[in-house]
Image (tube, rainbow, N blue to C red):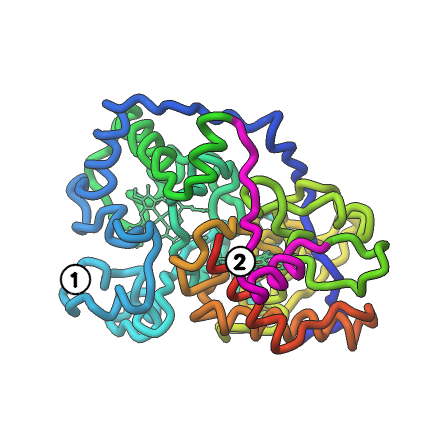
């Protein structure tokens, strides 16, 4: 772990003032949606046989380790980017972690030490396209895709190796279908009526304590500083930094990238590489990381190890977690957050930031309600 690179809350400033800039259309065109659904599930465009649904399964829109292991070795999932190494024909990584080797073009300021490569190959999990597509304009764990349409085209070219091109109508249709897949009632209601989704109150004592830990972001009220998940998981989608983060850390509210310390703590392993960032003054900043995330896109070393803050709605259904599926379950995820928050309390020296074992039980119970 690299303490020298520690920043309390690494962030990227893309303030998104959700309610004013989000262009949510309550009603998608049903004909377009239906066509998009067919393409998502069935279109191969004379490629390698994979469809979007090969990875974004119809049950959850994501891909779990269990789902991978239920497939026969002959399944189209087990193709090029699922292999352990490029060109290889072993598939242990995807069976153990459900990750694909994703090719990420690097900003011209970034390179890998002793390498002339212009793209990075990184193991990334399959995020769900449900719920987020309608309400989250930031796509991919590093935010590199600019629209659902371009993302779909890239996915068909990259994952499915298509030889026949989708039309613009097809791309719009897939995007419309993705936006239509809203399974959380509070979000559906938000889209249709504009009513902000409310966090569940919790019924049991444990759920209520979990809620308090999750939402208590007021350090000036005599409470010890708690976990305050909402510092990063706030807003209607629980995926943006809050006013509290602004007051305490000077991070603009609404920022969409941050670090949950997955790369810093090497959660989920991965190959450590040294990444070189050319600074404006000509100097080079070297950062060792299995995946520097957002920094590869912005070319700015300050963004190293920051990733998109994902929504937490319906999170109980989409294990494994984090960009690299580094946490296999909510329990593993909370073990990681406990280590992270205790590190902030003990090493960085912010009293009250730590998390007890009881806190973990409570937060888990609460996350199950979302
Ligand atoms: C071989 C597996 C695979 C296939 C096939 C696939 N995807 Fe993905 N998809 C991924 C992975 C892996 C990511 C995450 C990449 C990252 O974060 O760098 C992803 C990310 C996405 C995202 C971003 C979600 C978010 O919350 O940021 C969308 C949207 C998406 N895919 C749509 C599609 C569509 C549409 C298709 C079909 C045209 C498709 N995918 C085909 C593996 C796949
Ligand atoms: C410093 C900002 C920050 C704080 C504080 C924070 N998170 Fe996160 N959270 C993130 C980021 C960034 C990610 C994505 C990290 C990655 O992919 O490597 C994430 C990912 C997650 C995920 C995984 C979602 C998925 O679909 O993979 C869960 C669950 C989660 N956080 C819950 C929590 C809980 C519970 C708390 C409070 C105990 C919390 N977070 C506090 C920034 C934060």
> Horizontal placement of 368 versus 111: left or right?
left
Ligand 2 in which quarter: bottom right
Q: Foreground: 262 or 312?
A: 312
Whichever of labels 1 and 2 marks the residue nearer the N terminus, that label is 1
Q: Quadrant of the N terminus?
A: bottom right
Q: Residue at x 58, y 71 (%)?
A: 360
Element type at marker 1?
Answer: loop
Q: From what the image shows, is residue 10 above or below residue 156?
A: below
Q: Is residue 299 inside the magenta stretch? A: no
Residue 122: quadrant of the picture: bottom left
- Which residue is painted at 26% across and 49% down in the image? 58
Residue 306, picture quadrant: bottom right
State whether residue 286 appears in this view. yes
Q: Which residue is mark 1?
A: 75
Image position of 348 (left or right of 28):
right
**In this rendering, which labeled residue sits more in front, label 1 or label 2?**
2
Residue at 67% across, 47% down: 241
Secondary structure state at the residue bearing disc 2 = loop
User: What is the C-alpha distance between the residues marked 1 and 2?
Assistant: 43 Å
x and y, in percent, of residue 247 in the image: 82, 47
Judging depth in this view, the residue of 224 and 181 nearest the camera is 224
- Is residue 210 highlighted in magenta? yes
Residue 106 in view in this figure: no
Q: Is residue 282 left or right of residue 163?
A: right
Decide: is 364 above or below 37. Answer: below
User: Which residue is disc 2 drawn over?
Assistant: 203
Q: Residue at x 56, y 62 (%)?
A: 207
Q: In the rendered structure, which segment of residues is drawn in magenta?
A: 194-216
Name the spot of residue 5 as percent of width and height, x first.
Answer: 73, 67
**Badge number at residue 83:** none
How many other residues sit within 10 Å of disc 1, few (<14), some (14-19) or many (≥20)? few
């Amino acid at each position: 772990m690299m303490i020298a690179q520690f920043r309390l809350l690494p962030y990227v400033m893309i303030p998104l003032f959700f309610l004013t800039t989000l262009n949510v259309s309550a009603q998608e065109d049903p004909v377009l949606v239906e066509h998009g659904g067919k393409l998502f599930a069935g279109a191969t465009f004379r490629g390698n046989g994979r469809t979007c649904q090969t990875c974004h399964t119809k049950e959850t829109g994501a891909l779990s380790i269990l789902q991978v292991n239920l497939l026969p070795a002959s399944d189209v999932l087990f193709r090029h980017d699922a292999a352990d190494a490029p060109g290889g024909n072993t598939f242990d990584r995807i069976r153990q972690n459900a990750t694909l080797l994703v090719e990420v073009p690097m900003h011209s300021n970034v390179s890998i030490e002793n390498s002339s490569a212009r793209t990075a190959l990184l193991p990334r999990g399959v995020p769900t396209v449900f719920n987020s597509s309608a309400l989250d304009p930031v796509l991919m764990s590093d935010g590199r895709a600019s629209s659902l349409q371009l993302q779909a085209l890239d996915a068909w070219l990259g994952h499915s190796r298509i030889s026949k091109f989708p039309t613009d109508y097809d791309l719009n249709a897939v995007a419309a279908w993705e936006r239509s897949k809203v399974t959380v009632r509070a979000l559906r209601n938000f889209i249709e009526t504009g009513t902000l989704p409310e966090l569940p109150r919790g019924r049991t004592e444990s759920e209520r304590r979990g809620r308090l830990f999750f939402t208590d972001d007021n350090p000036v009220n005599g409470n010890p500083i708690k976990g305050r998940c909402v510092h990063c998981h706030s807003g209607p989608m629980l995926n943006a930094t809050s006013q509290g983060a602004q007051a305490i850390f000077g991070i603009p509210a609404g920022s969409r990238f941050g670090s949950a310390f997955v790369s810093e703590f090497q959660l989920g392993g991965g190959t450590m590489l040294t990444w070189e960032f050319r600074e404006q003054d000509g100097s080079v900043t070297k950062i060792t990381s299995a995946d520097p995330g957002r920094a590869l896109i912005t070319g700015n070393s300050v963004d190293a190890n920051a990733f998109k803050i994902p929504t937490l709605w319906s999170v109980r259904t989409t294990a494994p977690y984090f960009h690299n599926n580094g946490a296999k379950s909510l329990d593993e995820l909370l073990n990681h957050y406990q280590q992270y928050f205790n590190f902030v309390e003990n090493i960085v020296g912010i009293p009250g930031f730590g998390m007890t074992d009881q806190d973990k039980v409570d937060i888990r119970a609460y996350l199950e309600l979302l």
